[in-house]
Image (spheres, helix red, strand yellow):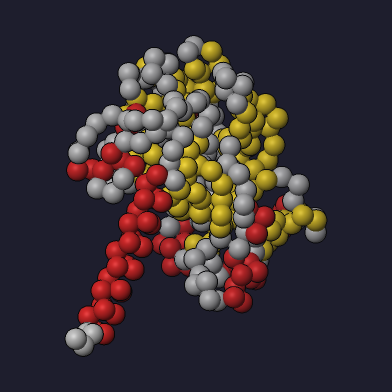
Amino acid sequence: MPINKKSNVARDWFNTIFYGALIAIAFRSFLLEPFNIPSGSMIPTLHVGDHIFVEKWPYGYSRYSFPFGSWHMWDGRFWGDEPEIGDVIVFRNPINESQDYIKRLIGKPGDTIQMMEGRLYINGKIVPRDNPRPYIIANLPKGLRSAGYHIPEKNMMIKGNKIWVDNKPAEFNYTIEYKDDKFCNMNEWACGVFEGIEYTETLPNGVKHSIVEMADDAPLDNTMMFTVPENHFFFMGDNRDNSADSRADIGYVPRDNVLGPAWFIWYSHNYYSPMLSVWNWGNKMRWARFGMGID
């Protein structure tokens, strides 16, 4: 009996694609899922252009852990532990379930949260912040990435991934992002060099992390007192004056919406350019952030 080789080849291709897709879905659902950072709300911890892995097992699994989670197939979580205050977590936006957000967990059920004059209060006690130091957020037109951007009054040069002051590498922390030239021309308010202050904040459970404040009188620096309801969490961005978080836009986040904690940065760049454009790697890649843990 003759063998239909074309039929066998087609079946082999189908099996390869089908089982490959199943393995990929299982890996992303149960183990690790990649995400990229599209906004600066978690500066200084995460920069725009960071690509991270998120662990899916530590907090267990909900319907949002899997494809088509918005179909409301079931409610609740199974397996896993409870998140801890200070964890950097990816979750599904409760207002728009097509969006994933990443923020820091600040409040658990029963906690009270309030901002007053730029200071965070948890359960009525001010959260310590210390070690103030300069922090610069540079959002510049992409055309300047090679030529550089000079600030004469500060004897500062921003070029590629580096900031130089008095012809020496800057001793403070910073983030540099290059935006499309047309975007900067049409949105001058969003492009420039912005000076803030980086603090070390110590949460009630002893977790220390960095935050950035541009001022202590921004719109979200004075809020009402929030009481986190049962089965919900309260999240905030580390870039306190530039974060859409539980203080306003997204409100309390249901426990089911949590996807998992951020693990580490596996790739980072400061503007989009095709990977094959190797001549751009020098001023595009943030090599020092490759493999960096997230805490």
- Compare residues 28 and 145 and report the one nearer the observer: 28
Q: Quadrant of the C terminus?
A: top right
Q: Horizontally, is 284 left or right of 103 in the view?
A: right
Q: Quadrant of residue 75?
A: top left
Residue 220 against residue 33 in the figure, above or below: above
The quarter of the picture where residue 252 lies is: top left
Residue 95 as seen in the image, left or right of residue 260: left
Question: Residue 153: horizontal and vertical position, in percent?
Answer: 72, 53
Residue closest to the eye, 188 or 71: 71
Residue drawn 62% across the image and 52% down it? 291
Q: Quadrant of the N terminus?
A: bottom left
Asked whether the viewer can see residue 205, the reply is yes
Residue at the location (23% across, 85% down)?
A: 3
Give the residue drawn at x 23%, y 43%: 70
Residue 60 in the image: state x and y as whole percent: 39, 33
Looking at the rendered structure, the number of numbered marks drawn on it comes to: 0
Side (left or right) of 210 relative to 76: right
Residue visible at 50% across and 25% down in the picture: 85
| Outermost residue to the top | 124
* Residue 225 in view, yes or no: no
Along the line of sight, the residue nearer the viewer: 5 or 49: 5
Q: Position of residue 104 (x, y in %)?
A: 49, 33
Q: Residue furthest bottom?
A: 2
Left or right, residue 69 beside residue 158: left
Q: Residue 285, position in %: x, y?
A: 61, 63
